[in-house]
Image (cartoon, rainbow, N blue to C red):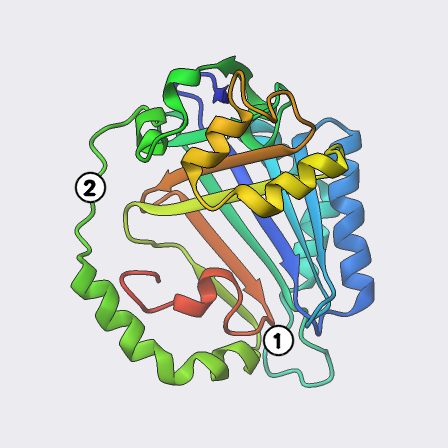
């Protein structure tokens, strides 16, 4: 696998910015244009825009920045004006809820791993270089082995998580439907929450490769044998990538304007130290 190599001691910024089904189209259009400008102006290193139309109509912009460039973008007049315009009075019923959220992750290079099966950058790789390290692939436990920091421990127990899940089950549907007026924020998270991205691009895969993929891959070992050197699909067109970041309290800021209560980490606010 090809692994991400990021400059040491230089935090990166990842933002997850999106809309809810009730977001006014004008806000969705403006938000999309702001990220398009960030890309064309070379402020962001990469952005993925994802659209969901199956059960809801929403958009997510997953964007990778150097921390310095992110601050330039965030404080630019157009971006500042956009987010400021969302801070409407929560008691003003004449203004429809914005349904916009913006989650900011500040990530230390020693607590993130990124990998892909092709020497083409994905995700955080756009902020560094790509190294071929097959010895850190193909076995359970390779993800933590790729992460530089080894003193990652959590005070939260399995029992704590089970209790939180049991308490939250009765109001899950309500959170998925209830719109919270005004602006909500999250500034604290428990240590060692993980942010995970996994992706597949089948556009360059042959018909034979797609068939083999559907019929044979029921385990990680089978996949690595097929795509590894000498495997039947070695050099195939299918592109896969994954990244895992370990966050600490202070690494996350969530802002939600007129959003459905289950949006992002807003859905677990008040649980296990998410505040």
User: Residue at 56% of width from left, 34% of height from top?
Assistant: 241
Instruction: From this view, report whether residue 12 is shown above or below residue 87.
Output: above
The quadrant where residue 141 appears = top left
| Marker count (numbered) | 2
Q: Nearer the viewer, residue 242 or 164?
A: 242
Name the residue that disc number 1 marks: 89
**Residue wearing tag 2:** 153
| Residue 250 shows up from this direction | yes
Q: Position of residue 57 (x, y in %)?
A: 73, 68
Disc 1 is placed on an element classified as loop
Callout 1: 10 Å neighbours few (<14), some, many (20+)?
few
Can you say which quadrant of the picture contains the C terminus? Answer: bottom left
Look at the numbered discs 1 and 2 and tell me whether their residues touch, using CB distance below 8 Å.
no
Q: Is residue 135 left or right of residue 235?
A: left
Q: Nearer the viewer, mark 1 or mark 2?
A: 2
- Residue 91: name its quadrant: bottom right
Task: Decide: few, some or many residues near mark 2? Use Cα within 10 Å; few <14, some 14-19, many ≥20.
Answer: few
Q: CA distance from mark 1 to mark 2?
A: 41 Å
Where in the figure is residue 56, as x and y percent of width and height?
69, 71
Across and down, in percent, residue 16 comes to 58, 49
Q: Residue at x 68, y 72 (%)?
A: 55
State the image coordinates of residue 48 (x, y, percent, origin top left). 68, 42
Q: Earlier in the sequence, mark 1 or mark 2?
A: 1
Q: Is residue 20 above or below residue 59?
A: below
Indicate left or right for 86 with 112 as reference: right
Mark 2, secondary structure of its residue: loop
Viewer-closest of 42 and 182: 42
């Amino acid at each position: 696998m090809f692994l991400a190599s990021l400059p040491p001691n230089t935090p990166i910024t990842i933002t997850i910015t999106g809309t809810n089904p009730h977001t006014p189209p004008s806000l969705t259009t403006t938000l999309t244009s702001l990220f398009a400008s960030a890309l064309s102006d070379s402020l962001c290193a990469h952005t993925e825009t994802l659209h969901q139309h199956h059960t809801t109509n929403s958009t997510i912009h997953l964007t990778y920045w150097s921390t310095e460039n992110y601050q330039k973008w965030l404080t630019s007049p157009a971006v500042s004006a956009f987010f400021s315009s969302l801070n409407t009075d929560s008691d003003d019923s004449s203004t429809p809820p914005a349904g916009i959220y913006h989650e900011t992750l500040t990530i230390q290079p020693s607590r993130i791993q990124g990998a892909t099966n092709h020497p083409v950058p994905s995700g955080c790789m756009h902020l560094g270089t790509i190294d071929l390290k097959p010895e850190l692939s193909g076995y359970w436990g390779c993800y933590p082995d790729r992460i530089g920091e080894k003193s990652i421990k959590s005070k939260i127990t399995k029992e704590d998580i089970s209790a939180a899940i049991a308490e939250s089950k009765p109001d899950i549907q309500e959170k998925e439907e209830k719109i919270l007026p005004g602006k909500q924020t999250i500034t604290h998270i428990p240590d060692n929450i993980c942010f995970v991205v996994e992706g597949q691009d089948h556009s360059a895969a042959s018909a034979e490769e797609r068939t083999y993929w559907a019929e044979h891959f029921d385990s990680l070992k089978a996949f690595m044998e097929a795509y590894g050197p000498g495997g039947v699909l070695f050099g195939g067109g299918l592109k896969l990538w994954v990244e895992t970041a370990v966050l600490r309290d202070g690494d996350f800021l969530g802002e939600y304007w007129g959003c459905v209560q289950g949006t992002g980490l807003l859905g677990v606010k008040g649980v296990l130290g998410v505040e």
